[in-house]
Amino acid sequence: MRAIWKQIRITGGYQEGPIGANPTIPERQLIDDISSLEDEYERISGAPPENLSHWNAGPLYRKRLLPLIFGEGDEDILDYIFSDELPDRGAITAKLGFGQFSHESVVTSSGTASISLILHHIATNIPRPIVFLGPTYFSAVHLARRLRLMHRIVPLEVLNLRFSIQATLGSDAITEPSIFWVTNPVYGTGQPYSERDIVFLRDLARAGHMLVLDECYALTSDIVAPNIWIPEAVISVCSPHKALNVNAVKFSVVTASPCHALAMDHLADVVTGGLSTSTRTAIRHFASTDFERATNAMAAFVAEIHGLLVARVPQNVLGLSAGFNQPFMTMNFFGVHAELGWDRQFLRQVLWNTGATMIPACRNWMNPKIGFAFRINLARASAQFWPALARACQFLSSFCGLPGAQQFESGR
């Protein structure tokens, strides 16, 4: 690490997106295709299929969490709300673990808005290429493309069912200073990084590279940016309610050194605009003890459902997420080709054999070596969820000839 720039080699060249004549985005089109398949299924069968991956929670989870989210109504719904006028930004970042560091923050309405703000800041002020470590959020990659930022996507290597940044980057060499875009936990899996990877990221920052840490799905206790904090080298984005599966009432906060944060605070007027009342409601909730109560209720619910899941699903399809109590998990089937996740006819075949739909992990640049994979949202657990999941796993296991295809139980 004594060189000015850590040298890392990554196969494949940088992409500089031309936007192109086709305005559609493949990852978004895949969601539209799944929705149309669901409509077709409901129209013919008379009942909707069960989407195992959908981001919205199911009725059981809602019943437990909603009383802990909504308090009294907001008295002021007329005036503009801007990030730099919020009196509690320091309290927000202190609760996220940044209190001891020199930093500033910008509040936005969502993680997507924060990511847009960061990428516009990079496009305007930081002339460096971006290395997205996959799986990652598709919106970030496509906005980088539309801003014509130099970037490449590097799927994380998997060793013994653990994702490893060090195994992915450690033995390679890049000479130019870069921006490494890291999602924690690993997108869609709930899997955290090892302490060895945290040290590796810190060494990258010390060696002159920059890090953008997307921790929108991280529980407050699992945020790693404060452990890697190096002034000027780290930009953090968090969205505390996302980890609770709360999608409508939420906020996001970008934390960075004062020079980066000031530039983004000015850009926010152009890129993200003012904040909504729901954002202020979420901030107040985050500052209250109700947020801890909601976090505990979420953890208890997920632990209960995770226990039921582990008891019913063989480890050969749950290994990437086994043992991590997060709402989103990933199932993978090594014997089924990963790229079938893009195949509408294959997804239709799965639907009509199981009554279930899912969002394939190839949409987020998961390493194809793990085979066909998809996320499941444990917050959707219901009487319909379990049998649909069992049928999907039975079908996919039989499809690839895995032993244990009969081990699944539909349960309750």
Image (cartoon, rainbow, N blue to C red):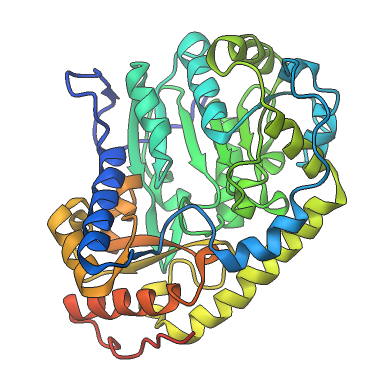
The relative height of residue 73 versus residue 404 in the rendered view (above or below) is: above
x, y percentage for residue 402? 23, 82
Q: Who's the residue at 75% across and 48% down the image?
A: 70
Residue, x 85% and y 34% (percent of image)?
91
The quadrant where residue 249 appears: top right
Q: Using residue 187 as the reference point, say whether residue 218 is left or right of it.
A: right
Residue 412 against residue 322 in the figure, above or below = below
Report the side of 314 relative to 119 (left or right). Answer: left
Q: Quadrant of the N terminus?
A: top right
Query: Which residue sits at x=73%, y=53%?
Result: 221
Q: Which sits in the foreground, 374 or 366?
A: 374
Q: Where residue 281 appears, x then y in whole percent?
A: 75, 36
**Taking the image as drawn, is residue 186 in sight?**
yes
The count of marks equals 0
Give the side of residue 382 with respect to residue 79, left or right: left
Q: Is residue 325 visible?
A: no
**Residue 279 falls in which quadrant of the image?**
top right
- What residue is rendered at 35% in x and 46% in y? 364
Percent of width and height locating residue 86: 80, 22
Residue 161 horizontal/vertical position (percent): 42, 67
User: Seen in the image, is 319 located left or right of residue 284?
Assistant: left
Residue 411 vs 338, above or below: the answer is: below
Pick the residue in front: 349 or 5.
349
